[in-house]
Image (cartoon, rainbow, N blue to C red):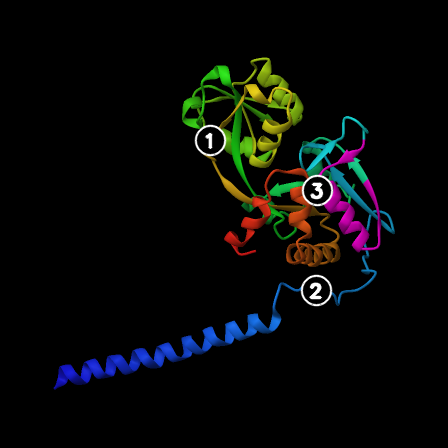
Amino acid sequence: MSKTILMTTAAATAALLAAPLQAQDDASSAFEEAIGAPQPVTNYPDPWPLQNLIEDGVLTVGTTGSSPPRTFVDPNSGELTGSYVELFEKLAEDLGLEIEFVQLDWAGILPGLAANRFDLACDGASWNPERLGSDQFLMTSPTGLNATVGITTSDTGLTSFDDVASGTIGGVRGEIYFEGAQEALPDAEAVDFPGLQESLLGLMNGQAEVIVMNLSNALSVMEDSPMAEDLVLVGPALEVFPQSLCVNPNEPDLLVAVNTLLGNYRADGTLSELIGKYATSTAEVDLLNRIGY
């Protein structure tokens, strides 16, 4: 009798718990059906009242111009181009601003924001605790996912980071991927370079066995570089991380504006379209939902 009562009580309790959950599922489905496809936000200020721009009416952007396919100099036209160059231009247009690019090495980008040299920067800065908590710059919502990999030449016979545990690794000075690889491979000798092209030259000259970089850059190099046939991808990835743009710390209003527009570009497909225009895959955008974006 007691067993029967307990079983009946348990069944009733389960039914009572399930009912609210079913109601929630039904409500969620109805809500999604009512809204339909992702809807960009349209009721924002136009023009946006930005108070602390470096120059009134101008969005000043710091970029390396040496991180293909996101930002690079077209060898035929000599013009700055790339998916993130177009993203910066789109942001400026939608904010009702002219745009001015300032080119400099990566090592000067974040200090340049802190020194009030530009309003917006970073061709996808990787998240870490120090950057997210910094008072030297602000980080936007993610624009993509990336990963730390390496590139080597086929004659080294290397295919994984385990193979280079005590070898020589190279990378761009100040880049988080290179710094992370040095921590992951403490016995490896490290050689730093001012930029991506210099690091690739160092690889060909034998200054480093493996050049560490983000996966986006690595895929671009292996597709477009004149020496692509001699290059091998080194993995698996040491780290996977979200990346974003960086905003001048004196301009929290610009952060709000940029985050609003980035959300729109995710919703209406603009961000994926810009990435796909210059890269073979849009996975870095498509997989943002894996981290809740």
Q: Amino acid at mark 1?
A: Gly
Q: Quadrant of residue 18?
A: bottom left
Is residue 137 visible from the viewing direction of this image?
A: no
In the rendered image, the vertical position of residue 255 relative to residue 281, given as above or below: below
Q: Which residue is mark 3?
A: 84
* C-alpha distance separating marks 3 and 2: 22 Å
| Helix, strand or loop under label 2 | loop
* Image quadrant where one finds the C terminus: bottom right
Q: Which residue is mark 2?
A: 41
**Residue furthest right as drawn:** 56
| Helix, strand or loop under label 3 | helix
The residue sitting at 62% across, 64% down in the picture is 37
In the rendered image, the vertical position of residue 201 relative to residue 196, given as above or below: above
Confirm whether the magenta stretch covers residue 193.
no
* C-alpha distance separating marks 1 and 2: 40 Å
Q: Amino acid at mark 2?
A: Val
- Nearer the N terminus, badge 3 or badge 2? 2
Residues at circles 1 and 3 in contact by the CB criterion of under 8 Å: no
In front here: 221 or 200?
Answer: 221
Please report the bounds of the magenta region as a residue range. 79-100
Query: Is 168 on the left or on the right of 1, as rendered?
Result: right
* Image quadrant where one finds the N terminus: bottom left
| Helix, strand or loop under label 1 | loop
In front here: 157 or 252?
Answer: 157
* C-alpha distance separating marks 1 and 3: 26 Å
Residues at circles 3 and 2 in contact by the CB criterion of under 8 Å: no
Residue 262: image x %, image y %? 68, 54
Q: Quadrant of residue 83?
A: top right
